[in-house]
Image (cartoon, grey):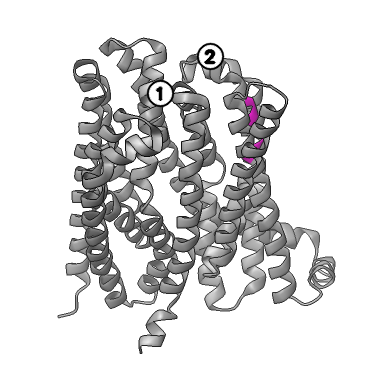
Amino acid sequence: MTFKKWTHPLVTGTVILTLTGLVSRFIGFFYRIFLSNVFGAEGMGLYQLISPVLALSFSLTVSGIQTAISKYVASETSTRDYKSSFRTLWSGFLLAMALSAVCALGIYVYAEPIAANFLLEKRTAPLLRIIALSIPMASVHSCINGYFYGIRKTAIPAVSQLSEQVCRVGSVYLIYFICQKHGLVPTISFAVAGLVIGESASMIVSVVAILARAHQVFPSFGYVYAKRHASQPFSSVIAVYRRITGQLLQLAVPLSANRLVLNLLQSVEAIYIPNRLMAYGLDNAAALSVYGVLTGMSLPLILFPSAITGSISVLLLPIVSEADASGNQSAVRRAIFTSIRCCLLLGFFCTALFLLFGRLAGRLLFHSELAGSFILTLSFICPFMYIASTLNSILNGLGKTIQTFLFSVVSLLLRLLFVFLAIPLYGIKGYLWGMLASQMLQTFLCTASALHISRRTQRP
C-alpha cells in the first residue's frame, strides 16, 4: 500500500515537478540577485514592467489551449486512443501558432505606442520588440507540455522548464562577461534577450520529446500517419480536425477570456504601481526603483516555496477531473482536505522563516534594507497564497471555472482599490496591505466553495 501511494501519478509527478521547480527557482533566485547588482533597482523595474505584455500575450495565444489539450488528452489516453490524442495536440498547436504569430507581429510593429500608452514608459519599447520573438516559441512548448501533463508524463515539462532556465541564465551571464571583457556597458536588453534564448531552448526540448513520443506510440509513425491520411478523403480529414478544433475552442475560449480579464487587471495593477508612487511624491526613477525592489527582489523570495504548491496544482487538474468524471467523489474529498492541510503547514513554516530571516536576507542577498522590509510584510500572505493556488486547481478540475474566475476578479479589484487609493496616501505600504487583504479574501472564497462541494458529495 505504501509503495502504491508513492508511485501514484500525483505523488511522482509532484516530486518531479517540485524538484525541477526548486532547482529552476534556485537558479532564477540567484539570477535575480545578479541582475539587481548589475542593472540596479531601476533597471529591474524596467525589466519587470514588460511582464504584463508577456502575460497578456500568453493568455491570448495559448493559455486556454494548453489546458484544453491537457484535459482532452487525459480522457483520450485513459481509453488508449493515442491517435485522437495526437490529433488534439496538432489541432491545438495550429490554433496557438496562428494566434501567436499575429500577437508577436502586433507587439513588434506597435512597440512604441504600447510602451508609451499602455506601459506608460517609453524606454520599454526596444524590450518589447525583443520579447515579441519569444511568443511563438512559448506557444510551441506550452502546447506540447499540455499534452505531456495530460498523459501524466511530467518529466518532459520538467526538463523543458529546466532547460529554459539554464539557457536563459547562462546566455545572459555569457553576454555580460563578453561585455566586461571588451569594456562595453551591459544594458537590461541583454536580460530580455535571454528570455528569447531560454524559450528557444525549451521549444527544442519539447519538439524532440514529442517526436520521440510519436515514434514510441506509433512505430514508423511518419509513414503510417501519411498512409492513413492518404487513404482518407481530404474532406473527411478536414471534418475530423474541424470537430476537434471546435471541441478545444469550447473549453479554451472561456478559459482564455477569463485569463485575459485577469491579466488585464493584473497589468493595470503592475503598470500603475510606479504611477501611483509618483502621486505619493516619488520621482520617476525612485518609483521604478521601489517597484523593482518589490517585484524583482522581495516577491521572488516569497514565491520561492510555491514551486511545491505550483507542481501540485498542475497535476491536480487532470487527476481531479478524471476522478469527478468517473464518480470517485472520495478521491475529490481527499484532494481537497489533503491540499488544505499541506498548504497550511507549508505556509506557516514559510511565514515563520521569513519573519525570522527576512530582513537579514534583504541585506545579504540584495544589499537592500527596503527588500528586507518588504519580505517581512509579505511573509504573512504565504499560507493564504498556497491554499488558494491548490484549491483553484481543484475547482477548475471540477468544472468550476466561472467560480474561480469570479473569485480572482473580486480579489484583484480589491487590490486595485489599494493601488489607486492607498498608495498615494501611504506609499508602497498601502499596496502591501492590499496584497494581504486580497489574498485572504480569495483564500476564504476558494475554501468555502471547496468545503461546500465536499459536504455535498459526501455519501450518507
Q: Amino acid at mark 2?
A: Lys
Q: Considering only vertical position in the picture, is 21 above or below 165?
A: below
Q: Amino acid at mark 1?
A: Ile
Q: Quadrant of the N terminus?
A: bottom left
The tag earlier along the polypeptide, 1 or 2, is 2
Q: Which residue is mark 2?
A: 122
Relative image position of residue 9 (x, y in whole percent): 45, 74
Element assignment for label 2 = helix
Q: Quadrant of the C terminus?
A: bottom left
Q: Is residue 42 shown to the viewer in this render?
A: yes
155 left or right of 287 in image: right
Badge 2 crowding class, 10 Å Cα cut-off, few under 14, some 14 to 19, many 20 or more, is: some
Quadrant of the rendered structure where residue 133 is?
top right
What is the distance, in whole Å, between disc 1 and disc 2 at their CAs?
13 Å
Q: Which residue is mark 1?
A: 271
| Residue drawn at 36 percent across, 46 percent down | 303
